[in-house]
Each structure stands twice: as C-alpha cells, then as structure tokens.
Amino acid sequence: MLYIIGLGLYDEKDISVRGMEALKNCQKAYAEFYTNAFHGKLENLRGEIKILSREDVEGKAAFIKEAKNKDVAFLVPGDPMAATTHVDILLRAKKLGVETRIIHSSSVFSAIGETGLQIYKFGKTTSVVFPEKNYFPQTPYDVLKENLNAGLHTLLLLDVKADEERYMSVGDGIGILLEIEKKRKENVFTEETMCIGAARLGGGSAIKYARAKDLADFDFGPPPHAIVVPGKLHFVEEEFLDYLK
Amino acid sequence: MLYIIGLGLYDEKDISVRGMEALKNCQKAYAEFYTNAFHGKLENLRGEIKILSREDVEGKAAFIKEAKNKDVAFLVPGDPMAATTHVDILLRAKKLGVETRIIHSSSVFSAIGETGLQIYKFGKTTSVVFPEKNYFPQTPYDVLKENLNAGLHTLLLLDVKADEERYMSVGDGIGILLEIEKKRKENVFTEETMCIGAARLGGGSAIKYARAKDLADFDFGPPPHAIVVPGKLHFVEEEFLDYLK
C-alpha cells in the first residue's frame, strides 16, 4: 500500500493524527519538498525518511513499485492532491496495480479563509511565476480579470523554486502584476488595487489588506506568501478586512 | 486565547498534531457539529468537551468572552475558516479584544482533488439545499452554467441539517438539479451530464464518475456527499476519470 500523506501548511505539527499513525506503521518512508516549502523538522516525525528530488519523483519513481509488497509512506507538503505531480503519482500507482490511500491535511485552498473572505466566492485560482528570458506569462492577469468581472475573489499563488531556495514574496508578485498592467493597460491590477498579502497561514500568519503599492513595501517575513484580490465584498467581509488594514 | 481548531474531514484522527496539543493544553473545550457531520469519537480527544448548539454559537457565544482570561478550545468540523459562522466568531472575538489562533485541518476544498481534477481549475463553489415550501433556489444551476461557460469545474456542496440528521445524498442532489433543469430548460444539467459523486473524502472515500442518471442510483453509503461537474478536461484529468467509471 502506498500512503500519500499531507504534511499540511507549515511544520511537522500540521500532519494529522491519522497521517502520523500511518507513517509510523509504514516499513519505508519518503518525502518531497520541491512542490512547496516545509518549515518543520522531519526527524521529529520518524527516524528514517528519505528525501526525494523532483527527478526521483517524476522519473522512474521506484517508491511506487516498492509499495506493491511493502507499506510505503510518501510525505508531501500541504494537502496531497492539490499538486498535479501527486495526482500523477496516484495515476501511475493505479496503472501498476499498487493500492493507495490518501491522507489529507491543511492546505492554502481552505486556509485562505483566514482572510475573512468566503471560500465559496473564490473564482479560478492562478499562479504568478518568476519571469525568465523570453517567458513572461500574463495568465494571472487574465484570470484576475475574469474573476473580477464575475465579482469573485482571486487567490494568486506565488512561485516556489524550492531547489533554488527561491520563494516569491508578496512584493515580488505585486511587482510582476504591475509589469503586466503596464503592457496590457486594462486597469485590472494597478498601484491602487486593494489586495491582501498573506504569509505562513496556520503558522503564525501575517495578513495585511492595503493598496498594492503599500503592500509591496510591507515585510511579510519568511515564505510561503500568497496574494488575494477581493471581488465584490459582502458587508461582513468588508468589516473583517477593516481589521486587516 | 481562543483556539479555533479544525477537526478535519472525517473522524477524530483528522485533527492535526498541533490541534491535538492545543486542545490538551486548553482549560476549557467546546465543539459544534451543526455545520457538518462528524464521524469520530469525541471522547478519544479529551475528557471534557461541551457540545454547543447553533443557538449557543450564534447567540451570546459565552465561550468567546470566557477566552479573555482562559485558554479555550473551540472544535469545528473540517477547516475552521471554511464556514461563514466561524469567520463571524473570529470577528466577534476581535471586537471583544479576545486573542485568537486558528489551527487548520483538512477540508473538502482541497480534498476534492481526490477526483483527479486540478484544484486551480475549479470555479465558484455552490451549495444544493433541501427545497422547502416556497423556497427552491436555482443558484447552483446559475453557478454551474457560468463555470461551464468558462470551462471550469464546479464543486457542488450538498445540504447538511445536522440537527435534524438530514444529509443530502448524491442522488438527492442530482434529483434537485434535474428539477431545476426541467424549469429552466437551458441544457446545463441533464440526465446525460457526466459528473462525479464523492463521499467521505479522506475517510474510506467512494468516488464515481458517470452520467447523472446512473450516478443517482449508485449507493455512496454514509455522508458527507458532494457532486462535481467537470468543465473542460485536460487529458491527464480524463485519464484519471477513466479509473473512476
């Protein structure tokens, strides 16, 4: 059996009791941290946990085959099925006839409710990625535009390149969105856009609501960071946001 | 300090280690189960936990004031901030100057990834409620229509009236959606619509992908249930769904 176990939002204490029990009973344990940051101490969970690189996970993935005859734990940051890589692992296990069990944990997709915005009023989620030479996708701008037109809130996830220890900050993300605005000039995300910066949800969070240009200068501390641009606000949401100014 | 602690998706083992620790250290502990089902044994968590009714929570909420001088735990199903009632608790605590700490847990909003559909491709979430005399809202139909037009997946949460022990099943939900289709005739949700029924995510889940009319007859077992109507499918999503047929 392959147990895909979520480590949750922040450190080793965010794993569920169910996940902890499964982890202890497994004969082998692996973990990956290239899809997101992990701020905990793995050694507090159990003695031997082998950390897998992106190549280990997306290449031959020997640990999946190993789970045919052994109980194998695969630890991942956040909730297991929020990253497409993990869905792929599950799919490959199904193809190999390896039994699987998913043990969920906390994730930014629900924790973002800490902003006081109603979860069910969020539209499509989008990611802001580090621009590279000849690669500057405007997707977050398009998604934001569509959501705003529909009155919906937008969660903007910020790029994580854990292997290079590069984690996009709220300030970086705002800078990139303003760059796209300069090119597009459709008035979707300007220096005056009221938005929320959120850092370390569930782990001593920092959340602030302000104009983009003011948020960009605010020090949110260590990653992970995220940005939310609210859509149409219910008066209770508005009242809540007043406390985050 | 008021600790609002998520119990997670299914039973008492879905609480995080962090939540468990906080709960043990609190002088008083309360819980509510009117916002969702809880299938666990509360007594496995700690000795004294007082269960609050909807009136207790939404009325005077004495436990908030109590947290001014004591460490008080308030246990809630799922993730704390996914229900608007809990956002309201947080807001009232802020107004009273009571310090708060949110401890997240697993939630349907990320666990729905168990369907293999990419979380960030979901549009607005909607709820299907039990119709009452003179009350038959068509909101889920409108939300579904908009999401489908944008190529997005739709999570349809199904009504929970925990105090009356009424939990909407996948079959009930499909019946209600087909009723609305009969009135609206816009071809948004028909007997032929391919959709996913999901039950007990994270707790021995049952997930099935089929035409609405076939899903309606399938026995998903105990609650909670949810329905997903996929939007435009990526080929990996399609491949995954083949395993859920």
Image (tube, coloured by chain):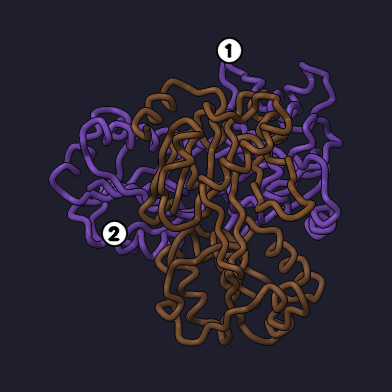
Chain colours: A purple, B brown
Depth check, front residue: A77 or B185: B185
Q: Amino acid at mark 2?
A: Ala
**Residue B177 picture location, percent across and down:** 63, 39
Residue at 68 percent across and 72 percent down: it is B54
Screen quadrant of the C terminus of chain B: top left
Screen quadrant of the N terminus of chain B: bottom right
Residue beneath disc 2: A22
Confirm or deny contact between disc 1 and disc 2 (CB under 8 A). no
Q: Is B192 situated above or below B98?
A: above
Q: Amino acid at mark 1?
A: Asn
Residue at 19 percent across and 44 percent down: it is A67
Left or right: B30 in relation to B69:
left
Residue A134 is marked as 1
Same chain assignment for discs 1 and 2? yes
Depth check, front residue: A35 or A18: A18
Q: How much space separates mark 1 and mark 2, taking CA atoms?
A: 45 Å
**Residue A163 picture location, percent across and down:** 42, 36
**Residue at the farthest left position:** A69
Depth check, front residue: B122 or A139: B122
Left or right: A71 in relation to B13:
left
Front position among marks 1 and 2: 2
Q: Chain of mark 2?
A: A
Image quadrant of residue A144? top right
Q: Is A15 situated above or below B164?
A: above
Q: Is B139 situated above or below A205?
A: above
Mark 2: few/some/many CA within 10 Å (<14, 14-19, 20+)? some
Depth check, front residue: A119 or B154: B154
Q: Is B18 situated above or below A19?
A: below
Residue at 77 percent across and 51 percent down: it is B135
**Residue B49 picture location, percent across and down:** 53, 83
